[in-house]
Amino acid sequence: MNNKNITRYTYESTDFQGWRVSIQRRGRIITRYFSDLQCGSEEEAHRQALEYRDRVFAQLAANRNNLEAYMDQELENVQEMLREKERGYSSGV
């Protein structure tokens, strides 16, 4: 199994256990976490992390001529997802 750009986190001292995808290109870094709890299992979190990583790699290849703009847009997508989660937590959802 190819786990390039994917790291497993299983620390007993934290609430998070899951997988982290981290991809860096031209000084920009995209990092996204896949929680075992939110995905339903360690295996499903890993499957989603692999799928996400492969999708980002495909988009990087397709956007090779405009890599900075793609990375900036993907970073904004991840940040918006986090803002939506925070709004859900603060409203009790």
Image (tube, rainbow, N blue to C red):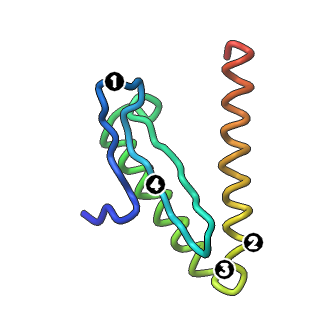
Question: Which mark lies nearer to you, 3 or 4?
Answer: 4
The single residue placed furthest to the bottom in the displayed view is: 65
Q: Position of residue 77 (x, y in %)?
A: 70, 52
Question: In screen coordinates, is 92 left or right of 4?
Answer: right
Residue depicted at x 45% and y 58%: 51
Q: Secondary structure at mark 4?
A: strand
Using the numbered discs, state the Cα–Cα distance from disc 3 to disc 1 in whole angstroms. 40 Å
Out of 58 and 25, give the one closest to the viewer.
25
Tag on residue 21? 4
Out of 9 and 88, give the one closest to the viewer.
9
Tag 3: residue type?
A: Asn
Tag on residue 68? none
Q: Tell me which corner region of the image, top left, top right, bottom left or bottom right, holds residue 80.
A: top right
Q: Secondary structure at mark 3?
A: loop
Residue depicted at x 69% and y 46%: 79
Q: Position of residue 27 (x, y in %)?
A: 61, 70
Q: Which residue is mark 1?
A: 13
Q: Which residue is mark 2?
A: 69
Q: Earlier in the sequence, mark 4 or mark 2?
A: 4
Tag 4: residue type?
A: Val
Q: Which residue is mark 3?
A: 63
Q: Earlier in the sequence, mark 3 or mark 4?
A: 4
Question: In screen coordinates, is 24 left or right of 43?
Answer: right
Task: Please determine whether, in this image, residue 40 is positioned above or below residue 48.
Answer: above
Q: Residues within 10 Å of mark 2 (few under 14, many from 20)?
A: few
Q: Residues within 10 Å of mark 1 (few under 14, many from 20)?
A: few
Tag 2: residue type?
A: Ala
Q: Earlier in the sequence, mark 3 or mark 1?
A: 1
Kindly check if marks 4 and 2 are in contact, taking CB atoms under 8 A apart as contact. no
